[in-house]
Image (cartoon, rainbow, N blue to C red):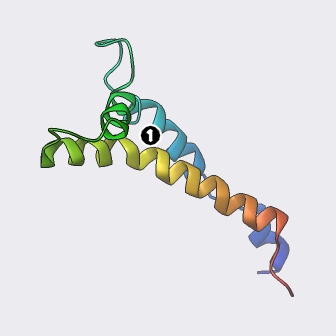
Amino acid sequence: MNSNSKKAVKPGYIKHYFLASLTLGLAPWGISGEPHIIGKIRWIWGGAVGMQPLDWFDFVLHGAPWALLIGAILWEGKKKFFPAAK
């Protein structure tokens, strides 16, 4: 296999992270009028008073797709704009 065939195949993980961010990252849909993760971020910015371990787990669960998406975009940008020396 030559090096050109390796470059032609791109993993589709960014699409999966984007889909996960839209579904799990923004859940629940339409119940309170805002995504659940936004409410958790506001709670943490307000000092996280009264947050239980289950609330922190919920924050991690809803925030993980966003963290993966941002990390994947940064990783792809790094590979595109700062290619490794050959």
Q: Residue at x 47, y 31 (%)?
A: 22
- In the depicted structure, whether residue 72 falls above or below residue 56: below
Dot 1: few (<14), some (14–19), or many (≥20) neighbours within 10 Å? some
| Percent coordinates x, y for residue 62 in the rendering | 34, 40
Q: Nearer the viewer, residue 52 or 16?
A: 52
Secondary structure beneath dot 1 equals: helix
Looking at the rendered image, the quarter that the C terminus falls into is bottom right
- In the depicted structure, whether residue 70 falls above or below residue 29: below
| 3 to the left or right of 46 | right
Looking at the rendered image, the quarter that the N terminus falls into is bottom right
- In the depicted structure, whether residue 69 falls above or below residue 35: below
| 71 to the left or right of 63 | right
Q: Which of 44 and 84 is in front in this view?
A: 44
Q: Which residue is drawn at 39% across and 44% down?
A: 63
Q: What residue is shown with label 1? A: 20
Q: Which of 13 and 32 is in front in this view?
A: 32
For badge 1, the amino acid type reads Ala
Q: Which of 34 and 79 is in front in this view?
A: 34
| Percent coordinates x, y for residue 49 in the rendering | 20, 39
| 1 to the left or right of 50 | right
Choose top left, top right, bottom left or bottom right for residue 44: top left
> What is the number of callouts on the image?
1
| Percent coordinates x, y for residue 11 in the rendering | 62, 58
Q: Residue at x 44, y 40 (%)?
A: 20
Choose top left, top right, bottom left or bottom right for residue 54: top left
Q: Which residue is drawn at 54% across and 40% down?
A: 18
Query: Outermost residue, bottom direction?
Result: 86
| Percent coordinates x, y for residue 59 in the rendering | 30, 43
